[in-house]
Image (spheres, rainbow, N blue to C red):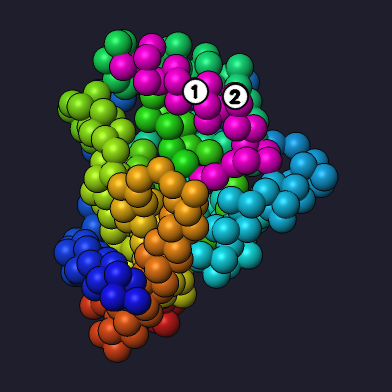
Amino acid sequence: MKRKILIFLLLCSVFQSCYYSTEKRYTVAQPYDPNDQLYFDEKDPQFEEGEPYSVLDFIGSWIWIESLLGKLMIWDRRIQNHKISFETKKYLMDYIRDNNLKDVKIRFNQYAPWDDLRRLWHSKSVNPLLKWTIGVFAYLVNDVLLVGRIFGGDHYNPYSNTIHIYSDIPAVVIHEGGHSKDFAQREYRSLYALGYAVPILGAFYPEARASDDAIRYFRYRCDKTEEMTAYRTLYPAYGSYVGGGVSDLIPSSPYALLYTYSILAVAASTGHVVGYVREKQVEKEWIPKECMIAAELEKKK
């Protein structure tokens, strides 16, 4: 019991140190040296969606254990449901356009390993050594072996500069867009990608940064509904990242899996608590001045 309380308090301190700031002015991306070889045309559109296969999508949504765990931890059935609404896709399309991300590929519930290999081949985002070692490994695992239509989890691949979406939650898709924005603005992308791969701590900062950008983007759009939803979604999601990092420290034993899922449950629950508190705080202080001005101008039309 004392161990669980200690983990809870530790997680709370991590969340407090990574508190997302809506007070900061939202800034659109200014990509550093975008790859014009990966710009798009009619034959190769920037946004693509996989053909619907009801059996595969049902397995990926309701049979695959990681999908079920994701739904439980976030407490939202739209996580990895493999059916993305037009409204959710539109959020990400607007985000990509607003942030000048012209060379990132977005796949909605699509498995396209050959095209992803082509993008990896032409990518100049990272050092060739990293691309043909870690990048190829990430491609083989995430884009080939773990068929996204079944085992898919929302993620951004910096080596091929591709976003893969399987959930129907605007906060989640903007969060993944936030990763591509964060990466696009880096001069030393190879070091940043390598840092993300560091065990335990590597993902903490990039995940917090992507969530911060997603929440501030909804504030920038004066979208109170999705901003409030983001607190209930991204905080427990961040908790799962922290929990996953902590669980890497667990030594091998017959009970390792039980300990891992227990830590993830505590971490996600902590995220829900902190997210709920933050949501209530923001509700009291919401409407930003620029949103009030926009609302007044809309009334005068």
Task: State whether residue 273 is above or below residue 54.
Answer: below
State whether residue 126 is above or below residue 231: above
Q: Is residue 166 above or below residue 228?
A: above
Residue 20: quarter of image: bottom left
Residue 95 drawn at (x, y percent): 41, 49
**Is residue 129 among the parts visible in the rendering?**
yes
Q: Is residue 207 left or right of residue 168?
A: left
Q: Are marks 1 and 2 in contact (CB under 8 Å)?
A: yes
Q: Is residue 140 magenta?
A: yes
Q: Position of residue 105 (x, y in %)?
A: 49, 31
Q: Is residue 196 magenta?
A: no
- Residue at left offset 27%, top offset 15%: 127
Q: Nearer the viewer, residue 116 or 296?
A: 116
Looking at the picture, tell me which residue is in the foreground, 243 or 36. 243
- Left or right of 189, for residue 294: right
Check disc 1 and report the residue beneath it: 139
Residue drawn at the location 49% of the way across and 23% of the way down? 139
Question: Which quadrant, please, contains the N terminus?
Answer: bottom left
Q: What crowding class fits label 2: few (fewer than 14 Cα within 10 Å), some (14-19), or many (20 or more)?
A: some
Name the residue type under label 2. Answer: Val
- Main secondary structure type of the part rendered in magenta: helix
Place residue 222 in its image quadrant: bottom left
Counting the numbered discs, the total is 2
Q: Residue at x 52, y 27 (%)?
A: 141
What residue sits right under mark 2 in the picture? 144
SS at badge 1 = helix
* Magenta segment: 130-154
Q: Does dot 2 land on a helix, a strand or a loop?
A: helix
The spot of residue 161 in percent (x, y) is 41, 28
Q: CA distance from mark 1 to mark 2?
A: 7 Å
Tell me where residue 7 sits by quadrant: bottom left
